[in-house]
Amino acid sequence: MNARSPRILIAPACYKGTLSAGEAAEIMQSALREALGDTVDLQVCPIADGGDDTLQVLSQSWAQARLNSLRVTGPIATMPVQAHYLWEPAAKTVIIESAQAHGLKLLGAERHPVAATSYGVGELIRESVRQHQPDTVVVSVGGSASTDGGLGALQALGWRFWDDQNYEIQAPLSGGDLGRIHRLERSPLTAGLTAGHSPLPALRIATDVQNPLLGPQGAAAVFGPQKGASAQQCQQLEQGLAHVSALLKRSFKVDSAALAGAGAAGGLAFGLLHCSENAQLISGSHWIAQALGLHEKVAAADIILTGEGRFDATSLGGKAVGHLLALAGDKPVFLLPGQCQSGLPLPNSSYCQPLAQDEASVQAAMAKPKEALREAVLRVAARQVLPLLKNHLPAS
């Protein structure tokens, strides 16, 4: 057998609000090379799960994928944004990162939990299908500013909504409008989505969470506060989501509200499920991992280095890093999150080394995230990775 260098797979997700997955991977690679020299084979594969960085991660790995730009409605009606989507011609697939249109990060410090809309996501779907006529559209959901049950997106795709006075609710519909809806009209052919007035192609809704639409684990209760919603606004949004859920159930004899993942992106996943008979929920982390060939990369690695902004219970419930841990099995995994929730079950071969331990160190790490991550990698490389390489992972 020919000798080979030990292989380390570098596969971080984004450190939300500070570092993209690609930036984190570059820092990890540079620090490991500084600490370990040329004695190891470093493989780099930034990861995502349907939330932030999905397009970036896929575009770096797919040679034929083309990034397209489109001006659409942003998270609030008065805020147009320049959004991007991917077209993969070999697979005839469009990939849309919904946060490009209604992402919370687009608002900066502002929050508009009741006025926010997913209308721009529907525009991205509509125009990308008109342009490319794909066989499949994958919509990754996560990081949204809106809690409109996806009805804003449906409105952009040709659905119409009226109030109890029979006045049509004008676009773009927001979370605050849900309780006003008395009647709706589904566009069976998606309102001329393509030149031939054909229905939507296969629609895959890639979610990064398992939350249902309603209840204490639902879109409004869990994610509303993160989007700036007060307790009263969360209640308003919950009531609106429950109202439209009941309306859709009566209209189409389908109840999707309780499905795991239906509450993703403020219920965008729920709304898109009603968009087409060819729509279905999929795991964003699983789909992206398959697209990246992550399973094969993990199998070929001796050690894995990963990280994200905060490792908590949601990480193990559909996020990219949780899926990576599952793929790794008994392989040594060094997890370098910004913060780490205590008491989480980890494989015996996994080592969690958070960048920040208390509020003061959190602020310091966020002020200089590149330096904080580099120092953490150098520390782990010297104290744990290098001894592990010497004692347990000789070249084979």
Image: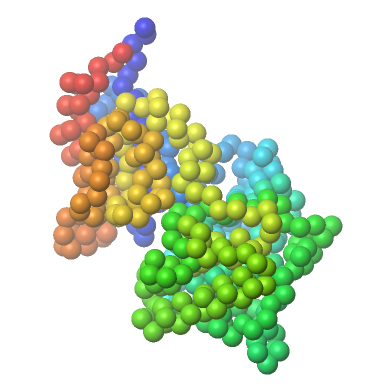
234 is higher (above) or lower (below) than 291: below
Which residue, as the protein is rendered here, is positioned at the far bottom?
165
Out of 311 and 108, give the one closest to the viewer: 311
Q: Residue at x 50, y 63 (%)?
A: 258
Out of 251 and 384, give the one closest to the viewer: 251
Quarter placement of the N terminus: top left
Q: Is residue 72 visible?
A: no
Instruction: Identify the image quadrant of residue 152.
Output: bottom right
Which residue, as the protein is rendered here, is positioned at the far top?
1
Give x and y (percent) for residue 32. Answer: 28, 34
Quarter placement of the C terminus: top left
105 is higher (above) or lower (below) than 369: below
Q: Is residue 259 visible?
A: yes
Give x and y (percent) for residue 199. Answer: 76, 57
Q: Is residue 251 left or right of residue 325?
A: right
Give x and y (percent) for residue 251. Answer: 67, 72
Instruction: Identify the image quadrant of residue 383.
Output: top left
117 is higher (above) or lower (below) than 303: below
Q: How many marks?
A: 0
